Image (spheres, helix red, strand yellow):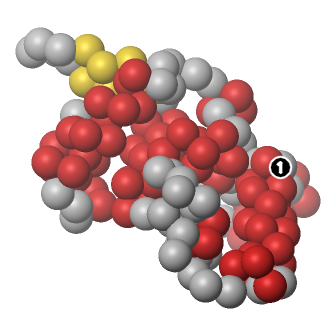
Amino acid sequence: MQLTLYTDYSLRVLLYLASHPDKRVTINEIAEYFGISRNHLVKVVHNLGKLELIHTIRGKSGGLLLAVAPENINIADTVRYTEPHMNLLECFDDVTNTCPITSQCALKGVLFQARKGFMDVLENYTLADMLPKPAIVYPEIMNKMEHKS
């Protein structure tokens, strides 16, 4: 299973915005951080805005902000919004399928199950789950560190 770059970039934009909740972020900033094309990001950001996952603010003090709390952005939903079809094989699309063995082939059913399993796992996670966790400092460790100073 391979997701498109479009989905990859969409998830990166959302993660970047979620990790900078107190500031307006520019497309240029995200493009520079990830080393990806600004032009690709413009399309991604436009779509995320249409999906109402982000706010896009124009002007001198403009930028991008999450429109939805990270814990309310499901990873599976985001993949569904950004992937064009999730067809693993040609035979997944009844309109364009030209495979001559489709009616006798069991592989399609197995791969449908695999795709469902993939999406079922993603259903269990939100954008908040993907953010780095702050380091936990236990009191007993802090006491030892203070006594060494």
Q: Nearer the viewer, residue 146 or 36?
A: 36
Q: Secondary structure at mark 1?
A: loop
- On the image, the x and y values in percent for residue 127 come to 64, 43
Q: Nearer the viewer, residue 129 or 110?
A: 110
Residue that mark 1 sits on: 124
Which of the two residues, 99 or 43, is positioned nearer the viewer here?
99
- Residue 128 seen in render: no
The image shows residue 148 at horizontal and vertical percentages of 72, 70
Q: Is residue 126 above or below residue 7?
A: above
Q: Is residue 124 left or right of residue 79?
A: right
- Where's the N terminus, which quadrant? bottom right
At a point 54% along the width and 40% down the height, the residue shown is 81
Confirm whether residue 84 shows in the render. Answer: yes
Give the tally of numbered discs: 1
Image quadrant where one finds the C terminus: bottom right
Residue 97, picture quadrant: bottom right
Q: Position of residue 9 (x, y in %)?
A: 38, 54
At 69% from the left and 47% from the top, the residue drawn is: 76
140, 6: nearer the viewer: 6
Left/right of residue 141 with respect to residue 100 in the rendered view: right
Q: Residues within 10 Å of mark 1 (few under 14, many from 20)?
A: few
Residue drawn at 75 percent across, 57 percent down: 119
The residue that appears at 41% across and 31% down in the rendered structure is 48
- Height in image: 94 above or below 64? below
Query: Looking at the image, which residue sits at the far right?
Result: 140
Q: Position of residue 77 (x, y in %)?
A: 66, 40
- Lateral position of residue 103 relative to residue 10, left or right: right
Give the residue type at disc 1.
Asn
Compared with residue 101, is residue 71 higher up or lower down, i.e. above or below? above
